[in-house]
Image (spheres, helix red, strand yellow):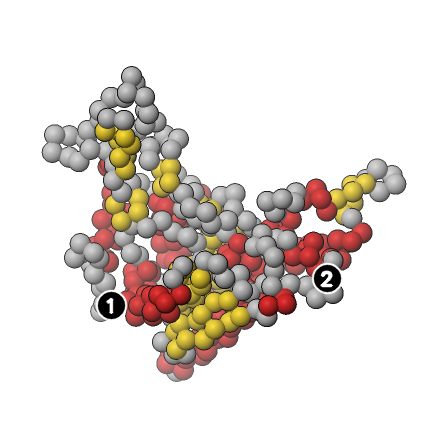
């Protein structure tokens, strides 16, 4: 029987799983997305192809059912979108579960906070829109990779917005990926909220900031007040912790798949220690640790089998931006910048192959 992980309140991960999904509503989009994902997974399972579920971007926490106000984070989805491309280059089919409007594989090359994709375009003598000469070669390479992924039906893009949508989709996709066995891989790069507003404590309408329009709301005489409510002139937000589902993912939802999570820190003294703690607590295969200020240039792999190992991009090959500036940089440089994901993903793929071989040996 699978070991159960204790939650902060003393309940097991399994019971927290059941309680969360029993009390927080299934997203309206799930019934549409699930059959599409099932068909995609079954196609690649029949071809004995490895499938990576890459999660990307941040999750929002709505404060109202009819959402006007919400809590969010800064993640643009750079790590996930970039890694998805390299998984495809390494022979995987990819399910890209991403925050709506965050960066996407391939189109990320033309998305930048200061450079619009139109900066790559011009008119020819006949007035047709064409790619500027200096970007032709780089853009052609991106286009060829994208077209190949489309021809092979190797990339499935599924969006989420809220942490509730993310958790429901993660569980659903994990269950659907079970027929893949050890050919499944979870690359959990999304920045998932640590706290949320339970459905039972969410107000229906926009929280009024003016006392002239504010009306106190309760959910019954003995119930707590709504999680987000006004007290005098102050907005009070009382959030619940999001249950830690990683142990359930390892033990119950995807017991044969390779599970990889990320740990972001700002204190270098804590990075390896907290990555090791997460690895041991949740019993998955690899934690990739990164510092906030150097995450584009170096990461540390922490695994049960391999201990700790660092992956670093040489200083002279580092990107200047995390958001697709590589096309402009490479067009102006003899040595294009190296994305650290181009180093991370092949190492992950190598570890995954070793895991698959071990699984085959055990089944003989």
Residue 171 is tagged as none
Nearest the eye: 47 or 37: 37
Q: Secondary structure at mark 2?
A: loop
- The residue at the far left in this view is 222
Q: Earlier in the sequence, mark 2 or mark 1?
A: 1
User: Considering only vertical position in the picture, is 215 above or below 358?
Assistant: above
- From the top left corner, tell me how far across and down residue 90 is, in percent: 57, 68
Residue 260 in sight in this render: no
Q: Which residue was labeled with disc 1? A: 2
Callout in the foreground (2, 1): 2
Q: Quadrant of the C terminus?
A: bottom left
Q: Quadrant of the N terminus?
A: bottom left
User: Considering only vertical position in the picture, is 288 above or below 332?
Assistant: below
Confirm or deny contact between disc 2 and disc 1 (CB under 8 A).
Answer: no
Q: Say which residue appears at 49% left-offset and 70% top-offset.
A: 348
Tell me the CA gap for discs 2 and 1. Answer: 53 Å
Quadrant of residue 8 in the image?
A: bottom left
Report whether 138 appears left or right of 7: right
Q: Say which residue appears at 29% left-offset and 32% top-offset.
A: 235
Residue 312 in sight in this render: yes
- From the top left corner, tell me how far across and down residue 32 is, in percent: 44, 43
Nearest the eye: 311 or 169: 311
- From the top left corner, tell me how far across and down residue 220 is, in percent: 15, 30
Q: Secondary structure at mark 1?
A: loop
Q: Residues within 10 Å of mark 2 (few under 14, many from 20)?
A: few
Residue 333 is tagged as 2
Q: Say which residue appears at 19% left-offset and 31% top-offset.
A: 219
Q: Say which residue appears at 45% left-offset and 58% top-offset.
A: 292
Report whether 9 appears left or right of 182: left
């Amino acid at each position: 029987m699978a070991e159960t992980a204790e939650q902060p309140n003393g309940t097991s991960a399994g019971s927290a799983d059941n309680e969360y999904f029993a009390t927080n509503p299934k997203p309206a989009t799930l019934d549409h997305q699930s059959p599409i994902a099932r068909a995609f997974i079954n196609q690649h399972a029949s071809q004995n192809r490895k499938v990576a579920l890459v999660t990307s971007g941040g999750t929002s926490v709505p404060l109202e059912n009819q959402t006007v106000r919400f809590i969010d984070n800064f993640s643009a989805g750079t790590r996930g979108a970039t890694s998805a491309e390299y998984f495809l280059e390494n022979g995987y089919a990819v399910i890209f579960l991403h925050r709506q409007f965050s960066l996407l594989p391939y189109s990320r090359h033309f998305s930048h906070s200061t450079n619009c994709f139109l900066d790559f375009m011009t008119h020819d003598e006949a007035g047709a829109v064409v790619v500027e000469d200096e970007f032709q070669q780089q853009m052609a390479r991106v286009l060829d990779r994208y077209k190949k992924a489309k021809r092979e039906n190797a990339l499935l893009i599924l969006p989420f917005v809220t942490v509730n949508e993310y958790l429901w989709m993660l569980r659903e996709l994990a269950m659907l990926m079970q027929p893949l066995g050890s050919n499944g891989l979870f690359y959990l790069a999304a920045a998932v909220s640590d706290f949320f507003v339970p459905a039972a404590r969410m107000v229906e309408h926009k929280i009024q900031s003016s006392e002239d329009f504010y009306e106190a709301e309760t959910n019954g005489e003995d119930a707590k007040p709504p999680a987000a409510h006004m007290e005098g002139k102050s907005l009070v937000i009382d959030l619940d912790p999001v249950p830690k589902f990683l142990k359930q993912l390892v033990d119950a939802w995807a017991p044969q798949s390779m599970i990889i999570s990320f740990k972001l820190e700002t204190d270098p003294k804590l990075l390896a220690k907290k990555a090791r703690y997460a690895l041991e607590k949740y019993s998955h295969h690899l934690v990739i640790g990164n510092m906030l200020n150097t995450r584009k240039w170096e990461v540390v792999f922490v695994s049960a089998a391999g201990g700790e190992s660092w992956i670093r991009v040489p200083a002279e090959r580092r990107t200047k931006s995390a958001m697709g500036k590589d096309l402009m940089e490479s067009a102006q440089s003899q040595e294009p910048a190296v994305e650290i994901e181009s180093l991370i993903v092949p190492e992950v793929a190598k570890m995954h192959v070793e895991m698959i071989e071990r699984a085959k040996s055990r089944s003989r």
